[in-house]
Amino acid sequence: MLLNPGISLLLALAFYLLWHGRRDHGYVLVAAAGHLATALGFLVQDVMPPLPLELQRIPSNALFLLAGVLLMGSLLGHYRLPVPWRSFSVMGGLGLAALSYFLLVQPDLNYRIFSISFALAAIAFLTVFELRRTGRVNLVDRLLLWACILTGTNFLIRPIAIIWMEGGYTDYVGFQQSLYWTTVQFSQSLVSIILALCLMIAIAQDLIFQLQTDARTDTLSGVLNRRGFEDVATALLARHEAPLALLLADLDHFKQINDHHGHMAGDAVISGFGRILLDMAPAGAVKGRIGGEEFALLVPVPTPETALALAGALRERMATPLDASIPHTTVSIGVTMAGPGDRLDSLLQRADKALYRAKRAGRNRVSLHRPTPRQEAAC
């Protein structure tokens, strides 16, 4: 009798500790509450003294329904999907109402079993329907989806099959030693552990991804740092089919900003240009801060003219004061097109030459590197 509440309490504690370390993940706390509700439901059902008319069945099954709602809600919360709390509540409420009817008005133990089991199955299958909308198909996501399918199937098929095999039950005498209740004890602990492990693996996967993202992101500008830019840009160059352009941008007179206004002002300028890149870079572009005041943008574009137009738009946006509290500065940009077999280092060298030309021409300019110096154009 203590197997399921013991397992559920341990899982509730595990999820609570996970949430305590990452309080921005509210769905983890919801999972902890779901396992706690499961434990309380079994304690009320199996441990507390029986009430007249078996009334303890109402709070215990209400806790089981609440646990199902919370656990399924936590899975949807993991994917940041809207949780259909209203639909869950309706399903749970109908199940509890049916149980109460077949307990107090027209007593029938078999229909009480079906009432709660089918309500839990409906909650699980609605979660399966919602999870299919994520579009995520990696192994962990599939495991979570199949864990929900297993949960729903368990609540739908098991009571029908066992009651058909045993011919049903007339009262609670010996019920807790019946095949049905034995399978409840076993299947519930198994399903709880499977759901919990799948969700914990998904949480761990997200944390690893977040750590990897943080490790290659420049926190000041919000774009990739040099290492992250080189990794992602190299991968894009290796697989690209459409033409690519590399834009190398350098903030003009940045040292003077730090010297005259302080490093906090310089940080504000870096942050402001990072926001411009994030706002204006087209889809598929790789954005990075590869030096103190130097940024790179590897972007799919059809022609050099398109690359120049994007660089010009970035230059014009930066030429407009970002904010009254941020010192005004401009940006110079060197542009080069990627050819077949081009490596990132060769692209950076060519873009750097174009950037040097823009600086030498007076800054706040865009320069395009062409195959020969005579074809190099500045604008």
Image (spheres, rainbow, N blue to C red):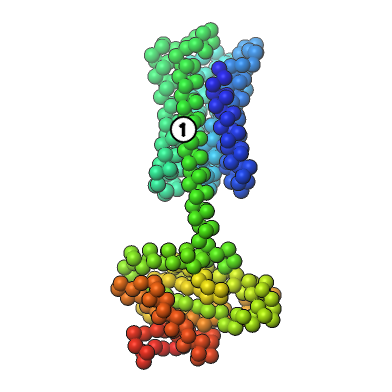
Quick one: SS at disc 1? helix
For mark 1, what is the residue?
194
**Residue found at x 50% / y 61%:** 216
Give above or below for 351 relative to 86: below
The spot of residue 252 in percent (x, y) is: 57, 82
Towards the viewer: 322 or 271: 271
Residue 317: quadrant of the picture:
bottom right
Q: Is residue 86 above or below residue 218?
A: above
Q: Looking at the picture, does residue 69 appear above or below residue 179?
A: below
| Nearer-the-camera pick, 344 or 87 | 344
Which part of the image, by quadrant, shows the N terminus?
A: top right
Residue pictured at 47% horizontal, 12% vertical: 178
Report how many numbered discs are placed on residues in the image: 1
Graded by Cα atoms within 10 Å as few (under 14), some (14 to 19) or many (20 or more), the crowding at tag 1 reads some
**Can residue 24 be seen from the camera position used here?**
yes
Q: Amino acid at mark 1?
A: Ile
